[in-house]
Amino acid sequence: MAKYASPAQVATAALLYAASIGLALAQTLTIGVRGGPDSIDPHFTATGTHAEALKHVFDTLTWSGNGLEVEPRLAESWKPVDPTTWEFKLRKGVKFHDGSDFTAEDVKFSIERIPLVAGPNPTTIYVRRVSGTKIVDPHTIRIMTNGPAPVLPNDFIRLFIVSSKAAAGLTKETANAAFNSGKAAIGTGPYKFASWTPKGDLVLDRFDGYWGGKEPWARHVRKEIPNDAARVAQLKAGQLDLISRVPAADVATLKRDPNLRVEVVDTVYVFNIELDQRESPPAGQISAKDGSALAKNPLLDQRVRDAIDMAIDRKTLAEISMEGLGKPSHQMVTSSIFGFNKSLGERKYDVAAAKKLMADAGYPNGFRINFAFTQDRLPGDRQVGTSVAQMLAAIGIEAKANAQPAPVFFPARTRGEFSMSMSGWGTLTGEAHYTLSSLAHSNDKEAKMGAFNVLNYKNPQMDKVLQDAAVEMDDGKRRALLEQANALVLKDRQRLPLVSVGSAWAMQKNKVKINPRVDEDTLAMDIKPAN
């Protein structure tokens, strides 16, 4: 005999259903980010926005704390067992999203696949010191290095661990498709991959079997919205819970909104210019103002590089172009980074002296140069790049501003297509060697340094200092070497630091709160319910 619910039971059921829907919505965290991943393969590129997104799905061997201190992650502890061997004790009881066990085999596999699949912004810098691996037992692995490697645990904050079973057999040609479909996107992180639309939404579901405990958000949606105005508008309309990289011009207005909260932090990113040191730059990059060829590359002349440096008003860039969200920077690393040289003074702004240097170098009327920079990666990148181009006009350099989306800019830059470009670099490991060995060491595949030095800058003294620092186990001596390297960057002026980047987040005051990070990562794990 059929049973019928009473009106009271129907009403109660309706209320419970409505409550459950409301709870589900409350457990969804939707944020707007300026840039997202370039693939779901964490080893494809070293770009910051790529790593930021995939930290939710894939754990790393070590972790960078909010102040860039190195913390345990999938490795519970580590120690050097001899000058060229580190031993890592791995966390037990960790499960991949498919229920399989995490073991040392997955670490070995992840290290060895990186050189095979790394793309345009190579992730090989994180394993460049590794010469081999040895599995001691399922939860102990030894990493052999090509000489003493004092900061190997720092490098491993970007060593993403993938499933050796799920990613087995994938090549550079097949890996992206397998990860993007979700088939190989099996990690141990707090969120599971659900779906991804390139340049659109990345949808992640909570992994209730996560070793670190259950996250408060059942679902996390990351909407890639490169247009700053659109990101702000969607936040104000209540369509987003939080946005990252708030435009400086909107910070004060959003702070006055009673429904919103704004958090601001100084980051470790520094905008910097790199100048071509090749005898023959690419066609069309540098010319006389009438378009005719020059007898030689003017950027090879130290006086021209000095003049460019002196023509840039860093204070104006920080206060006007970045609307107060930046600070003048005179070194490639910020003051909190190990190896920052406190004895170096500020870079001098002097247009008259810069003009004289240009004349002395044989370019009293200047020259023309293409100037490429990102327009959507870090707060203020387009504005800073445009302002620099205007400043160089004062010394006769006609810099053609060429703002580009980051996915277009970085592959072209890696191919060496620019003679003058600007981007942001963050010392994410907390130690200056990470930055300087990548950018200021000559591009040396044998030494595995200079991977991001694509414009032929070479200084044997710099190379020796950085190579010595790479193997120096004494912290005091290593710090002195890195300070010396920073002084050499200032002296040679092939790479010109401009301003450090401040960053702001805005959020729905009554729904979420964030613990902001100096590396600017926006992670669901740092975002909690407001109440």
Image (spheres, rainbow, N blue to C red):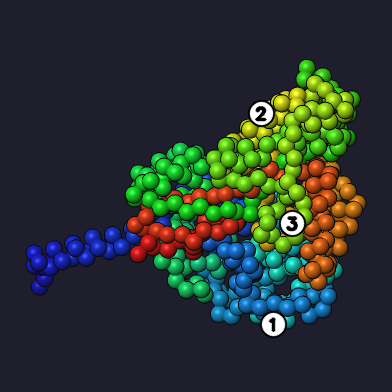
Quickly name the residue at label 3.
Answer: 342
The kind of residue tagged 1 is: Asp
Mark 1 and mark 2 in contact (Cβ < 8 Å)?
Answer: no
Counting residues from the start of the chain, the first of labels 2 and 3 encountered is 3
CA gap, disc 3 and disc 1:
45 Å
Mark 3 and mark 2 in contact (Cβ < 8 Å)?
Answer: no
Counting residues from the start of the chain, the first of labels 2 and 1 encountered is 1
Q: Residue at x 50, y 42 (%)?
A: 247
| Depicted 114 relative to depicted 74: above or below | above
The kind of residue tagged 2 is: Gln
Q: Residue at x 75, y 40 (%)?
A: 348
Locate residue 85, reporting x and y percent: 79, 75
In this rendering, the label closer to the viewer, 3 or 1: 3
Counting residues from the start of the chain, the first of labels 3 and 1 encountered is 1
CA gap, disc 2 and disc 3:
30 Å
CA gap, disc 2 and disc 1:
60 Å
Locate residue 242, reporting x and y percent: 43, 52
| Depicted 370 relative to depicted 275: above or below | above
- Using the image as rendered, state which of residue 228 and residue 348 is in the foreground: 348
Relative placement, left or right, of 85 versus 65 is right
In this rendering, the label closer to the viewer, 2 or 1: 2
Q: Residue furthest top?
A: 290
Quickly name the residue at label 2.
Answer: 390
Q: Residue at x 54, y 50 (%)?
A: 503
Q: Quadrant of residue 341?
A: bottom right
- Can residue 159 be seen here? The reply is no
Relative placement, left or right, of 287 versus 401 is right
